[in-house]
């Protein structure tokens, strides 16, 4: 199957040295434009995510209130992602990205209006989370696979690593920006500003002429047949299955997202600005990881081990976070969590896409997104547990369980993982 892509620029015959692969990737037609639009989206999504969490903590003192938001959105993504993967493999990825960003921007403007008019209620935010989850289930795999369509498989590693650096900038900049916007301008201005940014990111993608659509056979099958084909493909390959099992530990590792604002407000008592700094520190770790993996790509035979190992490192970080000795301690652990989480992200997105045929990328990557969203179970569980036993003990338990399970998986399955 052929996929629309831009050709790699030929080296100048008069040049004495070829440019660095990263620089060469940026020189590809339309990639710099795509990277810029993704960076803007990452920043705005991070601002919206943190603003939503902070808004919920102001509407309710229950720890489970934040967790329920993540449970609803993550559950929606997990349930819809398999079908979303089929859509991504069959439709124009560029158009899916544009439509998804317009939808997200519109939803954010609606929330801003509800807050401004003093009509916002918790149940409304739950409804917004469901709609946002539906959009995100398509937007996630479409964005990641469209990068490969634009640069070609030979530049996949560099392009995904650069995309990950954009995510890091977004986490750092978005976290710091959210703290400033919420603390200085207020929650309404925060939502409005981020919504406009998302719409601008959509406009940038419109200017890219490549549709990013996989060529399909003349005789098209039903979406359900494509879905079954994707599951059968993975089921017949044990290395892929074991790597996906490691990804499923996100069921526990997603506990930090709902607990970060709780720690900022109630455990560390650092307020909205400290909340933003915690998120920004996480972004520093993600940036270091993205830069490192871009400059020193992992060996292909290590991809499966790295997927499980980085997930283990993240789980161990949650145990350290739970101690909550001081704000400085939490900032340091946030850097570690950002580092290991970003390594997992890059290695998983690159590794799974290169391990499967082009026509299967959307479906297999949607499985990764589905498993990553299993954290929606843990998100609800950690909030309820925190209400019962305390914030620090709850987070510690949600870090200890996957640490034990992943240690066993790597000890007994490392030979299989090396075959991915």
Image: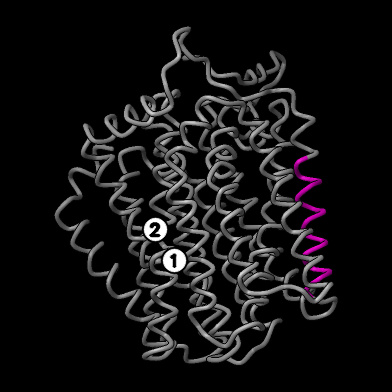
Q: Residue furthest left?
A: 412
Residue labelled with disc 1: 254
What range is drawn magenta here? 187-202
Q: Secondary structure at mark 1?
A: loop
* Residue in the foreground of this view, choosing between 206 and 103: 103
Residue labelled with disc 2: 374
Residue placed at 61% from the left, 21% from the top?
Answer: 5
Q: Quadrant of residue 46?
A: bottom right
Considering only vertical position in the picture, is 252 above or below 389? above
* Residue in the foreground of this view, choosing between 327 and 88: 88
Residue placed at 47% from the left, 68% from the top?
Answer: 337
Q: Is residue 123 left or right of residue 339?
A: right
Q: Residue furthest top?
A: 218
Numbered disc in front, either 1 or 2: 2
* Residue in the foreground of this view, choosing between 2 and 17: 2
Q: Is residue 114 magenta?
A: no
Q: Quadrant of residue 395?
A: bottom left
Q: x, y percentage for residue 52?
A: 65, 70
Residue placed at 39% from the left, 24% from the top?
Answer: 357
Label 1 to label 2, Cα distance in Å? Answer: 8 Å
Instruction: For the residues labelled 1 and 2, say whether their Cβ atoms are less than 8 Å apart.
Output: yes
Which coloring applies here? one colour
**Quadrant where the C terminus is found in the figure:** top left
Q: Secondary structure at mark 2?
A: loop
């Amino acid at each position: 199957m052929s996929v629309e892509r831009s050709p790699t620029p030929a080296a100048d015959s008069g040049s004495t040295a070829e440019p660095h692969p990263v620089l060469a990737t940026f020189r590809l037609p339309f990639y710099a434009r795509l990277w810029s639009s993704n960076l803007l989206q990452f920043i705005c999504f991070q601002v919206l995510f943190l603003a939503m969490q902070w808004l919920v903590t102001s509407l309710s003192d229950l720890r489970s209130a934040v967790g329920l938001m993540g449970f609803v959105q993550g559950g929606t993504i997990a349930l819809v992602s398999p079908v979303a993967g089929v859509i991504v493999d069959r439709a124009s990825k560029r158009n899916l990205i544009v439509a998804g960003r317009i939808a997200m921007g519109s939803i954010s403007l609606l929330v801003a209006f509800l807050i401004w008019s003093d009509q916002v209620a918790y149940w409304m935010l739950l409804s917004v989370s469901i709609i946002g989850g539906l959009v995100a289930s398509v937007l996630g795999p479409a964005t990641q696979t469209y990068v490969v369509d634009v640069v070609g498989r030979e530049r996949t590693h560099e392009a995904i690593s650069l995309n990950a650096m954009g995510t890091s900038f977004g986490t750092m900049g978005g976290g710091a920006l959210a703290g400033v916007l919420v603390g200085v301008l207020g929650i309404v201005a925060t939502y409005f500003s981020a919504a406009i940014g998302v719409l601008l990111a959509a406009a940038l993608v419109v200017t890219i002429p490549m549709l990013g659509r996989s060529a399909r056979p003349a005789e098209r099958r039903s979406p359900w047949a494509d879905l079954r084909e994707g599951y059968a493909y993975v089921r017949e390959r044990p290395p892929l299955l074991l790597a996906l099992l490691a990804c499923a530990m996100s069921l526990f590792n997603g506990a930090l997202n709902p607990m970060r604002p709780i720690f900022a407000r109630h455990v560390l008592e650092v307020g909205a600005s400290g909340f933003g700094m915690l998120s920004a520190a996480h972004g520093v770790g993600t940036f270091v990881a993205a830069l490192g993996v871009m400059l020193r790509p992992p060996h292909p035979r290590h991809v499966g081990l790295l997927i499980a190992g980085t997930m283990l490192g993240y789980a161990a970080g949650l145990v350290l976070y739970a101690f909550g000795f001081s704000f400085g301690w939490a900032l340091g652990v946030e850097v570690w969590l950002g580092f290991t989480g970003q390594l997992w992200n890059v290695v998983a997105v690159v590794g799974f896409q290169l391990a499967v045929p082009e026509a299967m990328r959307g479906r297999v990557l949607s499985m990764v997104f589905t498993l990553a969203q299993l954290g929606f179970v843990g998100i609800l569980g950690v909030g309820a547990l925190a209400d019962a036993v305390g914030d620090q003990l709850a987070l510690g338990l949600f870090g200890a369980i996957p640490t034990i399970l992943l240690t066993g998986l790597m000890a007994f399955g490392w030979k299989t993982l090396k075959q991915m």
